[in-house]
Image (cartoon, rainbow, N blue to C red):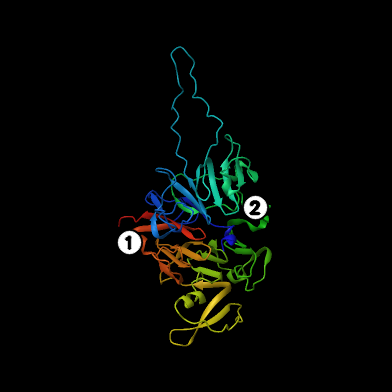
């Protein structure tokens, strides 16, 4: 199924707001964290220790450079892009440089080199490094990089490259971004959601297939955009969710399996402001401002945390006859349970379903892989479920789950998870030590 993983997997930043949208962390909150990885690493991509083809539980990330401060991670199937934070330049002299008998002179002007951003490192089937990078978004078909211009005030340039190009020669496509739309990287701080594939200014997004640049209607006022294998999710400034693309697995959430050519609001979520959206291969997740999780789409591996036929078969239960779609549109089937009766399972959930975590647990972040899901809670715990063949759930095994399960590693190590970023078959996590008291 590798050919279906070309597009659309996720980016996470480590330079922003974790405690609440729009609020900078206080000094007490700005504790230096670390990245961890687990899951598939068959192409040598940095992921924990990197031993073998897979890592079954969280391990500290092998950073691209000694002491590198990784602030952004975007994982595709066969490679991962890391953006490391730019180290501050040496301070300029506080006063003009003077020489006895001569007029005061200033320090030489900086040379015309890319300014702003950090360093991009690729690990896995694609490998290269480049400076002056603000952002990166990885897919099998395309590597998108937001790079600083050649000098101050020149804006930034969005470039689309073939992943194996090593960023040499000419990009497949380039677009200049004006200085007014650039934004600034926050110095220090902790993870927040990345901008790409939504472009600076929120008026367009980048796609891994031609024409690459896709404009958005101005009235959408996009805040976040996520791409799945065949669909897109958009979160607007008011917290409303829109979806479009192919819908044959129910991933659009409109109650049908029909495609949508243009962004369409999810009527089932009207009046419930959302804070996060995440798109998997063929499933979707959103987190409300009050911490509730809504999930829909394909449930082949339990990625919706709903009863899954494939997991029932692994559990040595025999598949029964399909009961067919229900009146509400969900594809509910049955399998013979342990007691001999017929137990329902859900293959496709074409509209948002409310997912319950343990009582008192509120979600704040979500990310999706090809067929797995990860959620961060307000208290810094990580829950994962879905397909686990390569250890991407982080439970030190290769089991798949159709119910949320807490990743105990971070609890045992007294770590608070602040961010999670799923690649198709792996997972990256940013965590900090728990505050004393």
Point out residue 396 in the picture as x, y percentages from the top left corner. 38, 64
Quadrant of the drawing holding the N terminus: bottom right
Q: Which of the two residues, 244 or 422, is positioned nearer the viewer here?
A: 422
User: How far apart are labels 1 and 2 at the CA level?
Assistant: 43 Å
Point out residue 273 in the picture as x, y percentages from the top left corner. 55, 65
Q: Is residue 234 visible?
A: no
Q: Is residue 168 above or below residue 377?
A: above
Name the secondary structure under disc 1. Answer: helix
Q: Is residue 47 visible?
A: yes
Point out residue 430 in the picture as x, y percentages from the top left corner. 42, 54
Pointer 1: residues within 10 angstroms few (<14), some, or many (20+)? few
Point out residue 167 in the picture as x, y percentages from the top left corner. 57, 43
Query: Who's the residue at 60% across and 48% down the image?
Result: 162
Q: Is residue 90 above or below residue 211?
A: above
Residue furthest out toward the left: 437
Q: Is residue 257 above or below residue 83?
A: below
Quadrant for residue 338, please give it: bottom left
Name the secondary structure under disc 2. Answer: strand
Residue furthest out toward the front: 52
Answer with mark 1 or mark 2, whichever residue precedes in sequence: 2
For discs 1 and 2, the disc positioned in front in the rendered view: 1
Q: Is residue 161 above or below residue 88?
A: below
Q: Which residue is mark 2?
A: 204
Q: Which of the two residues, 6 or 27, is positioned nearer the viewer here?
A: 6
Q: Which numbered marker is on residue 412?
A: 1
């Amino acid at each position: 199924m590798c050919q279906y993983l070309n597009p659309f997997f996720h980016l996470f930043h480590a330079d922003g707001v974790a405690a609440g949208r729009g609020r900078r962390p206080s000094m007490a909150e700005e504790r230096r964290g670390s990245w961890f990885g687990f899951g598939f690493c068959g192409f040598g991509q940095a992921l924990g220790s990197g031993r073998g083809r897979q890592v079954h539980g969280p391990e500290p990330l092998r950073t691209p450079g000694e002491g590198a401060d990784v602030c952004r991670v975007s994982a595709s199937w066969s490679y991962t892009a890391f953006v490391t934070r730019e180290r501050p330049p040496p301070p300029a002299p506080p006063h003009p440089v003077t020489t006895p008998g001569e007029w005061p002179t200033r320090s030489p002007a900086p040379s015309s080199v890319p300014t702003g951003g950090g360093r991009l490192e690729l690990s896995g089937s694609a490998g290269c490094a480049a400076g002056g990078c603000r952002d990166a978004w990885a897919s099998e078909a395309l590597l998108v990089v937001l790079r600083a211009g050649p000098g101050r005030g020149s804006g930034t340039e969005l470039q689309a490259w073939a992943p194996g190009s090593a960023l040499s020669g000419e990009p497949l496509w380039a677009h200049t971004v004006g200085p007014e739309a650039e934004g600034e990287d926050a110095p220090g701080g902790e993870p927040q959601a990345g901008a790409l594939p939504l472009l600076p200014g929120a008026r367009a997004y980048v796609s891994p297939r031609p024409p690459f640049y896709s404009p958005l209607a101005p009235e959408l006022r996009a805040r976040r955009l996520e791409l799945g294998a065949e669909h897109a999710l958009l979160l607007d400034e008011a917290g409303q969710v829109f979806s479009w693309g192919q819908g044959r697995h129910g991933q659009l959430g409109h109650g049908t399996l029909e495609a949508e050519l243009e962004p369409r609001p999810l009527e089932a979520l009207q009046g419930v402001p959302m804070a996060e959206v995440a798109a998997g291969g063929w499933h979707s997740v959103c987190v409300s401002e009050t911490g509730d999780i809504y999930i829909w789409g394909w449930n082949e591996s339990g990625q919706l945390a709903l009863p899954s036929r494939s997991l029932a078969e692994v559990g040595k239960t025999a598949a029964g006859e399909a009961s067919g779609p229900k009146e509400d549109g969900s594809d509910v089937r049955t399998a013979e349970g342990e007691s001999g009766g017929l137990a329902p399972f859900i293959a496709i959930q074409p509209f948002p379903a409310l997912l319950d975590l343990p009582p008192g647990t509120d979600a704040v972040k979500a990310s999706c892989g090809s067929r797995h899901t990860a959620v961060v809670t307000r208290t810094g715990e990580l829950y994962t479920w879905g397909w686990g063949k390569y250890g991407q759930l982080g439970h030190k095994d290769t089991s798949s789950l159709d119910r949320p399960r807490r990743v105990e590693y971070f609890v045992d190590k007294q770590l608070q998870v602040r961010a999670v970023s799923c690649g198709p078959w792996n997972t990256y996590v940013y965590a900090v030590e728990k505050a004393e008291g």
